[in-house]
Amino acid sequence: MSGLPNCPKCDSEYTYQDGNILICPECSYEWSADQVMDKGEASNEIIDANGNVLQDGDTVTVIKDLKVKGSSLVVKVGTKVKNIRLVDGDHDIDCKIDGIGAMKLKSQFVKKV
């Protein structure tokens, strides 16, 4: 029809352009025309807090004190986590931390070393 991409949030086909911004009238989502990516490509990339793409086997550093749910332990800022494994879900990093054990982390709280 108009050649504009569907809304990335609700997949509506009724998007329209206002300057350099694309707008969805159904869910009111706004995004930049420069950010349009293929859906399959976007779901496979997991990025850290600085925007670097993470891969299996990378070493990352924790950027914020993280409380371990169900215990009194805390993962301190600067803790290095080696040999991470990327998984699907909210907590997208599976790893082992020395002194704590197996954990799942969110990629937004780590940076690539």
Image (cartoon, grey):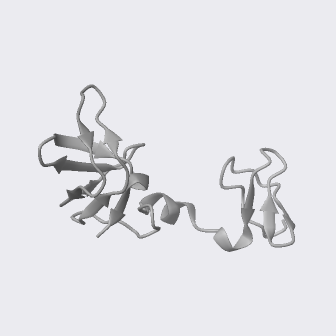
Q: Position of residue 111 (x, y in %)?
A: 36, 63
Nearer the observer, 55 or 59: 59
In percent of the image, x 72 and y 67: which residue is there? 32
User: Residue 109 at what x, y percent from top left?
Assistant: 39, 53
Asked whether, in this view, residue 63 is left or right of residue 56, the answer is right
Is 101 situated above or below 2?
A: above
Q: Is residue 22 left or right of residue 74?
A: right
Is 95 situated left or right of 1 in this image?
left
| Residue 11: percent from left, percent from top | 69, 51
Residue at 47% over, 68% down: 51
- Asked if residue 42 is positioned above or below residue 93 in the image, the reply reads below
Q: Quadrant of residue 16?
A: bottom right
Who's the residue at 81% across and 45% down the image? 26
- The residue most toward the top is 70
Q: Specify the farthest residue to the left.
A: 99
Residue 94: where, in percent of width, then height? 26, 48
Q: Quadrant of the N terminus?
A: bottom right
Quadrant of the image occupied by residue 21: bottom right
